[in-house]
Image (cartoon, grey):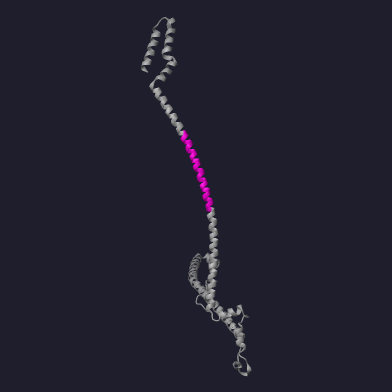
Amino acid sequence: RQRTIFRYTADLLELASDQDVRNWHVGLKKLWRDHVNPEIFKKDEGTSVPMQELGRQIQVMERKASMLALRSKRGEATCKADTRRKTQENSLLIHELEELRIEKKSLQAEVQELELQVHLAEQRAENKEIRKALPGKSGLERSSSNPRQVPQAAQGLFDEAPAIHRGPKGSKVSSGPVAKKQSAHKSQEELRKAKLSRKVAEQREQQRHQQRVREELVPQELDSLMKRRTEEEHLRSTSSAGGSQASSGPPVGGALSVVRFHQKGSPAGSVDSV
């Protein structure tokens, strides 16, 4: 660069030192040809090593940019494909989940039905055991289910009974059907007694439960009444200290709380406030 500037300066001084102005056009052409002509610079740029290296680097970067653009397009396409695939999988999973929910509901309904059937079967078994445990129940069931189907052999035996078995004053002993009716009547009475005893036991159990509940609730109500009474006494003392409030009327909370314990046949009772 310094050499180029030095040569240009030297040519310009040489042109300026020439006193013959008619020869200046030759010097100007020379200056143009040597220092200003753009073709020279283009030729130098094409032939210079740095410019060649720069062009090569530019080409390399252009190739890299094109490769990156291609890779980005491929990545975008793969991402879109993955998104579509995952969306389809999610939709399938949602559909399967809905099917599983429906199946779960149906299975729960079946389980409830089976539990109900088991409960009914247990109740039937308990009822059968109770009936077996009660005396005279089997005879009642047979007589109530088929009262008219009596064996003919038994009827013959009852008909062929001798007159010795007749009671005093010509009264006959009760025949087979009459005895069966009496036994059925007795078994019905026993069933009624068993039902009554069961009801009485249930009522007693309910009374015991109510009594336990009352015994648990009475201390809490007593505590609340005591707190209320202390608050009323505090308000009464503050109102009497004021003077004007005491003369205007009765103090706030002047109602008395009365605790009454009443229960038929039980020591515990309920708390009433008047």
Membership of 19 in magenta stretch: no
**Residue in the foreground of this view, choosing between 16 and 35:** 35
**Residue in the foreground of this view, choosing between 198 and 258:** 198
Residue that sits furthest to the bottom in the current view? 169
Q: How many marks?
A: 0
Dominant SS in magenta? helix
**Is residue 246 shown above or below 2?**
below
Asked if residue 175 shows in the view, the reply is: no
**Is residue 94 shown above or below 107?**
above
Q: Position of residue 193 (x, y in %)?
A: 56, 80
**Residue in the foreground of this view, choosing between 107 and 198:** 107
Asked if residue 108 shows in the view, the reply is: yes
In this rendering, position of residue 92 left or right of residue 44: right
Q: Which quarter of the picture shows residue 255? A: bottom right
- Residue shown at 43%/5% (left/top)? 23
Q: Quadrant of the C terminus?
A: bottom right
Q: Quadrant of the N terminus?
A: top left
**Residue in the foreground of this view, choosing between 65 and 216:** 65
- Residue shown at 55%/59% (left/top)? 106
Q: Position of residue 156 (x, y in %)?
A: 61, 86
Tell me the magenta residue range: 69-97
**Is residue 265 shown above or below 77?**
below
Membership of 85 in magenta stretch: yes
- Residue shown at 59%/79% (left/top)? 142
Q: Position of residue 38 (x, y in %)?
A: 44, 16
Q: Position of residue 103 (x, y in %)?
A: 54, 57
